[in-house]
Image (tube, grey):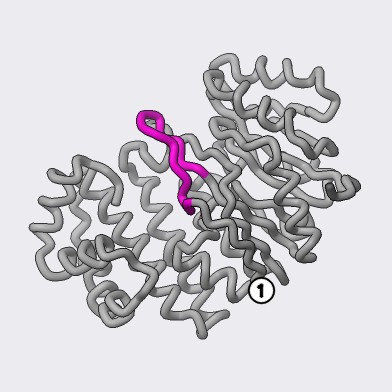
Amino acid sequence: MIKRESLITIVVPVYNVEKYLFRCVNSILNQTYKKLQIILVDDGSTDSSGKLCDSFKSDKRVSVIHKINNGLSSARNAALPLVKGEYVTFIDSDDWVDKNFIEILYKNLVKANADISVVGYYISPEQGKEHSYFGKDVNVEVMDSKQALGTFLLHDGLGVTVWGKLYKTILWKNIRCPEGKLHEDQYTTYKLLDLANKIVFDKVPLYHYYQRSTSIGHSSFSIRSYDLYDGIHEEYSFIINKYPDIKENAKLERDIWELVFVNMMLRANVNNKKIIKKVHQHISSDSNIIFSSNHLSRIRKIQMWLFTHTFYIYKFVYKNIKNRKTL
């Protein structure tokens, strides 16, 4: 066992999750690592979530912020000035974590002398069987920021999410989640990886991501959905300017996310010809990188080939055969 000396802060943004909040907070209170500051941020909930938050204050490690609703980024940002821990992590209020989640994150971080520690996660769909995103690979990797961003870009583990990671709190000194935007993690995580001198990644799954049909990633397309498209390109521009050595990885990441965005439009019957044309140009110009990559599945490569060569067939296949599932 490690010496439990460092205070670790856990931030939980809460909005209308009365059905899931006990599961989430209970998994935090039962952590094997006990030296915790737990900040629950009630972001103007209209159900009983706010009262439930207050009920957890019987545990002295728990404090509650009640604020006017302004979104996930605002809730996270509201907690950051109150963070007392040397390290901080974020858990979404409809998710939950294994009892050794914090202990393993912290143990790995201390052992590697890292600034960020990451673990794998389970995807737990609202309907369907829970499965691990990374399988049973238990290898632990230690990377510098460029190596971590290269891995992050190739979807080899370091995902875009803010959750599932333990950070030195100092990394957040000048970083805040963008308020008023959806897909806020797309604007945030790469900046933190860039600031870190060392990142340790353990693929053992310890975080349970509850995939609700009403979550941001699965809700209907709107004008705010374009935040994802803008975030993709902000991230891409930053990385190719600072890390030209991993430009090919950045192009793959951009092309994958652009195709995801087009899929979102197709599901919503949105026909933005300008964006579709631009994505077509990017994927076509990057075809050598795409089809020589060992990091893309055969299915993903087929998708990209269909998209660039026979868009109408791609559209038909996606909307009808895939039955509106995100690819």
Position of residue 283 relative to residue 119, above or below, is: below
Residue 33 visible (yes or no): yes
Q: Position of residue 47 (x, y in %)?
A: 54, 16
Give the quadrant of residue 283: bottom left
In the picture, measured across the screen, residue 18 lies left or right of residue 10, that is left
Residue sitting at x 45%, y 36%? 124
Residue sitting at x 48%, y 53%? 134
Q: Position of residue 315 (x, y in %)?
A: 14, 54
Q: Does the magenta stretch include residue 125?
A: yes
Residue sitting at x 12%, y 70%? 309
- What is the magenta range? 122-135
Near-viewer residue (306 or 191): 306
Residue 77 visible (yes or no): no
In the picture, measured across the screen, residue 123 lies left or right of residue 208, that is left
Residue furthest bottom as drawn: 245
Q: Where is residue 223 in the image (x, y as percent from the top left)?
A: 34, 46
In the picture, measured across the screen, residue 23 lies left or right of residue 85, that is left
What type is the residue that disc 1 sits on? Asp
Give the quadrant of residue 71: top right
Q: Is mark 1 on a helix, strand or loop?
A: loop
Neighbours of disc 1 within 10 Å: few (<14), some (14-19), many (20+):
some
Residue sitting at x 45%, y 62%? 155
Q: Does the magenta stretch include residue 100?
A: no
Position of residue 215 relative to residue 202, above or below, is: above
Near-viewer residue (215 or 31): 31
Q: Position of residue 148 (x, y in %)?
A: 59, 69
Residue picked out by circle 1: 144
